[in-house]
Image: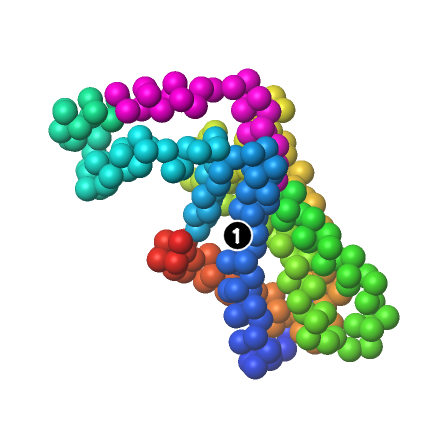
Amino acid sequence: MLKFNFLPKFSIVIFFGFFLFTIIGTLTHEFGHIAVAKYFGYETILDYGSMNYFPLGFIEDKDVKEIETISKEYLDIEYEQWPEDLKLKIKALDKIIMERYPYKESYKSNEFWITIGGPVQTILTSFLGLLILYVRRKIWMHGFKTVDWLFVFMSLFAIREVFNFINALYSSIMYSESNFHGDEFRISRYLEYNEWVVPTLTMILGLLISCYVIFKVIPLKYRFTFIISGIIGGITGYAIWFGFLGELLL
């Protein structure tokens, strides 16, 4: 149920709340991957929208550093246009690095669990927010406090699963894309399911959580403003973070 009254001052708070939590949700999702990678003993690097992990000692390896140094000025140029002597040098160094850090059978299993780490972090954060809201239900039923809005935002981390599904579906329909690189799609492929199975399940879970919080927890007088400002704030946060701010900071 909605009550179509718009609260301007409240909308500003929710706009910036969604803007901020879109960024926080993105980074904590990556920390979920990082936590699992660290557990398996990898070195990790955090990017603004992803993370990378490497065998212990890889990042500071002298040959890895040399490749980074000699290829730095060519990163914006197509590989085919690189000087032949540079490509030969990199191939030689790469061979040494591969011998120094050989592929192990355990890597495939580790990759599966590291991939799961991100979505699990997102969903657990959402459930934690729901749990705290449930414990505090006798309080917020008589009036929402500032801290209750914090737990609302936490519980809505699961919206990420809905957004990812819609974004992939749009790309599939409009551009005939397939074999998506999103965590949920990769998990489906690891499990040898159709790649849409896990994304669909997590989307349904995210949708159920979001609908419950919005239509059962948030007071009626705030709902319309919350939905409109949340959509605008979330999209703006995503566009700015992935457009330039994330790359600028990380």
Query: Disc 1 designates what residue?
Result: 26
Residue drawn at x 73%, y 52% as measured from the top left: 127
Residue 64 lies left or right of residue 152; in this view the side is left
Residue 21 lies left or right of residue 64; in this view the side is right
Instruction: Give 169 or 53, whichever is nearer the viewer.
Output: 53
The C terminus - image quarter: bottom left
Prevalent SS, magenta region: helix
The N terminus - image quarter: bottom right
The quadrant in which residue 9 appears is: bottom right
Name the residue at the bottom extreme.
9
Q: Amino acid at mark 1?
A: Thr
The quadrant in which residue 18 appears is: bottom right
Residue 66 lies left or right of residue 103; in this view the side is left
Residue drawn at x 56%, y 55% as measured from the top left: 25
Verify whether residue 115 appears in magenta.
yes
Residue drawn at x 16%, y 31% as measured from the top left: 82
Q: Which residues are magenta?
A: 92-118
Residue 90: image location, x then y, percent? 24, 26
Element type at marker 1? helix
Instruction: Give 197 or 237, whichever is nearer the viewer.
Output: 237
* Residue 105, above or below 149: above
Residue 37 seen in this snapshot? yes
Residue 38: image location, x then y, percent? 57, 39
* Residue 37, above or below 226: above
Residue drawn at x 56%, y 47% as measured from the top left: 31
